[in-house]
Image (cartoon, grey):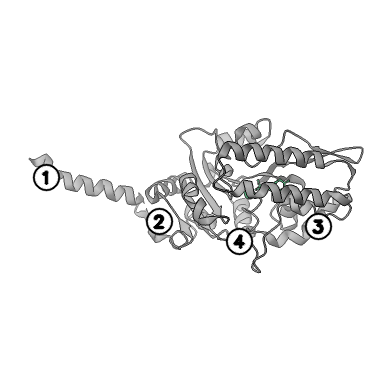
Amino acid sequence: MMRLALLPMIFARKLRNAQSCTMGTREIRVEDIDVLCSDSCKIKDPARVEKMLKELVAGGTQRLQVVTDFDHTITKQKLENGQKVLTSFGIFDECKSLPQNFRKESRGLYEKYRPIEVDPTVPMPEKIQAMIEWWRLSNELLKGFKFEAREIDDVAVRFKDALRDGTQDLFSELNRLQVPVLVFSAGLGDSVVAILRHASVLLPNVKVVSNFLQYQDGILNGFQEKFIHAFNKNETALEGTEYYDLVHSRDHVILMGDSLGDAGMADGIPKSSHVLKIGFLFDHVEQSLPKYMDTFDIVLIDDQTMRVPQKILSLITQTL
Ligand SMILES: Nc1ccn([C@@H]2O[C@H](COP(=O)(O)O)[C@@H](O)[C@H]2O)c(=O)n1
Ligand SMILES: [Mg+2]
């Protein structure tokens, strides 16, 4: 009888625990964090996010790392004037000395494959096949002509302001706190590095794993390594890189991406780890939202800022 009488209390306590997390005297509740309460922020399981935030806060910056995609994650998805932001491959295509047909063919590939990449109705195996084809053809296109690496730098300077609002502050804070940042991009690494450098965010804590150009006697010869495409961004792509050990040793991760394939960027780290996944959604919002909410812990719709990761970092450092 006595036990039965206690049931409602136990249930109420369990419910409370599911809704909020206490760290010391301070509670972390999604409903108290303004940037997580806006209409553009969708969270499928607030209790899970609260629990994860509590773990990240308790672990501090020593256990933390950031793993982030580049195109449309560090860069915006659209500019203030509504224009879409070019990808790192697209930025390369702006180089003046490229052979006449290069830009046309590259654009043609983009127009064929990009819609497949973002179409929520295309089944994943079909998507992966199409992406492999896209990157294979891009690799072929990038062969057999003379190219001066410095040209990318001249173009990249024009795109340094395409970074999400708050990126410089976020990166400089992460550097101050010595939190490693892995920029894991299926884009063109040479453009990624040039843009990060021009935007002053290629700081000592930042490493870039991406597709880098290979030269033979000044002639382009495709990518240096087996290519990383939109849906093979996982630990296999990191094997052999200096980042492999780090990804496995820092077990608190803030992960950011704009593609469903980005959610696997920290796969392979121990099961006990805590990976808070933030997804930036822009294309086909209504149709893609359910899948994004299943895949990412926090989904930000048409949010062109770093406000959410900045806020999370400030919770961890307790500065705001
Ligand atoms: N030839 C290509 C191949 C891919 N893209 C786009 O680049 C994006 C990959 O970069 P992330 O930093 O986001 O990994 C991918 O989403 C493709 O849309 C391209 O523009 N040209
Ligand atoms: Mg991207």
For label 2, the residue is 30
Q: Secondary structure at mark 4?
A: loop
Specify few, some or many for label 2: CA neighbours under 10 Å numbering under 14, 14-19, or 20 or more. Answer: some
Find the distance from the CA under tag 3 to the CA under tag 1: 71 Å
Find the distance from the CA under tag 3 to the CA under tag 4: 22 Å
Residue 303 pos. (x, y %): 55, 60
Between disc 3 and disc 1, the foreground one is 3
Find the distance from the CA under tag 2 to the CA under tag 4: 21 Å
Residue 282 pos. (x, y %): 57, 56
Q: Are marks 3 and 4 in contact (CB under 8 Å)?
A: no
Compare residues 120 and 149 and report the one nearer the observer: 120
For the point 78% across and 48% down, the residue is 106
Residue 103 pos. (x, y %): 81, 52
Q: Tell me the amino acid under the disc marked 4.
A: Gly
Q: Secondary structure at mark 3?
A: helix
Q: Tell me the amino acid under the disc marked 2.
A: Val
For label 1, the residue is 5
Q: Secondary structure at mark 1?
A: helix
Find the distance from the CA under tag 1 to the CA under tag 4: 52 Å
On residue 17, the disc is none
Between disc 2 and disc 3, the foreground one is 3
Residue 94 pos. (x, y %): 81, 56
Q: Could you tell me which quadrant the N terminus lies in?
A: top left
Task: Name which of mark 1 and mark 4 comes first in the sequence.
Answer: 1
